[in-house]
Amino acid sequence: MKSAVGSSKRSPILGVLLFSVGVLCIAGASYAVSLTARHIFLAQHIFLAQEEDIVPIIAGGMLDDIPALMRGNLPTVTNSMIAGRERREKPPRMCEMSDGHFEHPDIGHTAPHGYDKHNAYVRKYRSRRGVLNERELRAAQAAWHYFEKFTQDSTGLANSVGNYPSTTLWDTASYIAGMVSAYELCLIEKPEFDRRITQLLTTIKSLDLFRKELPNKVYHTKTGAKVDYTNKPGEIGFSALDIGRFLVWMRICKNRYPYLANTIDSVLLKWDFSNVLDDEGLMFGAYVDKETDETVYAQEGRLGYEEYAAKGFALWGFQPRLAHRAEPFLTASIFGVQVPYDGRDPRIFHSQNYVVTESYLQDGLELGFDMPHDDSSPEWVHTDGWRAELADRIYQVQEARWRQTGFMTARSEHNVKGPPYFTYDTIFSDGYPWNTVTPRGDYVPDHSAVSAKAALGLWALWDTDYTDVLYEAMIELYDPENGMFEGLYERGQGRVSIFTANNNGIILTALLHKVQGTILTPYTGDTEVWYIASRDQDIRLRRNYPDPPQKDDWLPALRHSVQEKADF
């Protein structure tokens, strides 16, 4: 009996012990599992972190092929970044310059002229530099009076010609050129500049575009409505050349005045660039077929203007490679100077090949004959070398004509008072030197003139005895209330008695160039809304918005062989 009772008392104690051992075993196993899992997780985390360190997504590498949204924003690559050089700086306004600002200018007098191994070009001529004297300041004030008188209060748009309330994007760019020059030459102060540029940009952003693509060729300045060439309501197409010039001045304003950057970007982000440039980098304008009312896109631009406008697109990241090339071109030997002209046959391409001064002046005054990615080369080294070399020929042939015939020569297209209202006053066109023709092709030698904008532009970029003669003829050719006259008739009929936005804007640019040098200054910001807006949408692809240009996207620096044709 004792044995049976004793056995029944030991059973609970043994059960408790066994239960406790089981709990301890389970707890130990759980701890071991959790510790193992923790080690596995930490090992995996470390591995992933190491993978991130080993295989990062680097901008500019092979992973640039992934969608732009995943790639993020890349910095715009310029030659100062590649070469490790210091960027040029924006010069001070004329009234803020120190007394010794022009004492030791770096103008490269000892540098041999010609091409270097990178196809940059050093001209044997130098630009004029210094503050404006009293005569030049009076001319600048007269030129600015044009815009004070002929800018519309309702829209902020300036008339292209005097009282006629019509304008183009080209002439609007000339107004912006006049506005920037007036501010930098201290003719107006910042409140007036800001009022004008803000109203103008607001109007441009609100313009009704040609078929929801790009600005119409012509607008009414009082209403901002689309009009045709007779200033009647309607749309007629867009001009790639006008847009290119406008883009040059938008980039100038954005780089000089960063506080305007968002506004400028928002203007351009309303536009659709899908049809203005093709995959090969040719520029196309648009017009309306009169019979079908359909939009027709046609290659636009000839030697001189085409390359200048192409650089306007390139300043915003586009790649107009073929538009920037000189080819196809020929030369006509005039007074021993090989004058370049576009080699495309007008009978086939239905566009005339006018050789005039203006497009070369704009490249030199505004862009310094430099490549769009150049933000650091000396002022006397022109990285878009062939443009500088051809510009020298355009100057030399006009000086040669004056020396050999006595005709003072500074040729460019210009307006005239009365029919035909506009004249192409050329150095060479239609197979003839010194040919003056109407847009319809009629020969009008009585409209030959010394262009005021061409004369003072040549004076600013070529410091020579001949341009001193041009200066004396033009510097006081103005009406104090209306602006600078268009020029002087070559055959002694007096002044070309008409006032235009383009003439006065370019003259102000030439005077500003004397004070500050190249008008375009480097961009000093980091990120641009223009390059990152709508990254999460397909609108960038549909409207052909570019990515920030990298080195492989740069326009190539070329030189072109001299091509000869007949002597004239």
Image (cartoon, rainbow, N blue to C red):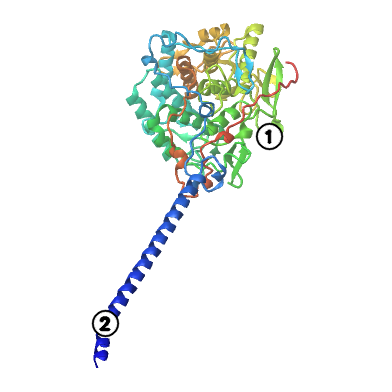
Query: Which residue appears at 32% of the width and 26% of the height?
Result: 191
Residue 423 appears at what percent x and percent y?
A: 58, 23
Label 2: how many residues lie within 10 Å, few (<14), some (14-19) or many (20+)? few
Image quarter (top left, top right, bottom left or bottom right) of the C terminus = top right
Q: Please tell me whether mark 2 sits on a helix, a strand or a loop.
A: helix
Which quadrant holds residue 154? top left
Say which mark, if any, is on residue 12: 2
The amino acid pointed to by label 2 is Pro
**In this orientation, does residue 168 appear?**
no
Residue 308 appears at what percent x and percent y?
A: 57, 27
Residue 529 appears at what percent x and percent y?
A: 43, 39
The amino acid pointed to by label 1 is Phe
Location of mark 1 (residue): 349
Label 1: how many residues lie within 10 Å, few (<14), some (14-19) or many (20+)? few
**In this orientation, does residue 530 appear?**
yes
User: Label 1, label 2: how many angstroms apart (C-alpha)?
Assistant: 111 Å
Query: Nearer the viewer's eye, disc 1 or disc 2?
Result: 2
| Position above or below: 324 against 491 | below
Which quadrant holds residue 176? top left
Callout 1 touching callout 2 (CB < 8 Å): no
Q: Residue furthest bottom?
A: 1
Viewer-proximal residue among 342 and 557? 557
Q: Please tell me whether mark 1 sits on a helix, a strand or a loop.
A: helix
| Position above or below: 333 against 238 | above
Viewer-proximal residue among 453 and 268? 268
Q: How many dots with numbers? A: 2
| Position above or below: 66 against 169 | below
Which quadrant holds residue 83? top right
| Position above or below: 100 against 549 | above
Residue 247 appears at what percent x and percent y?
A: 50, 32
Give left or right: position of 542 versus 515: right
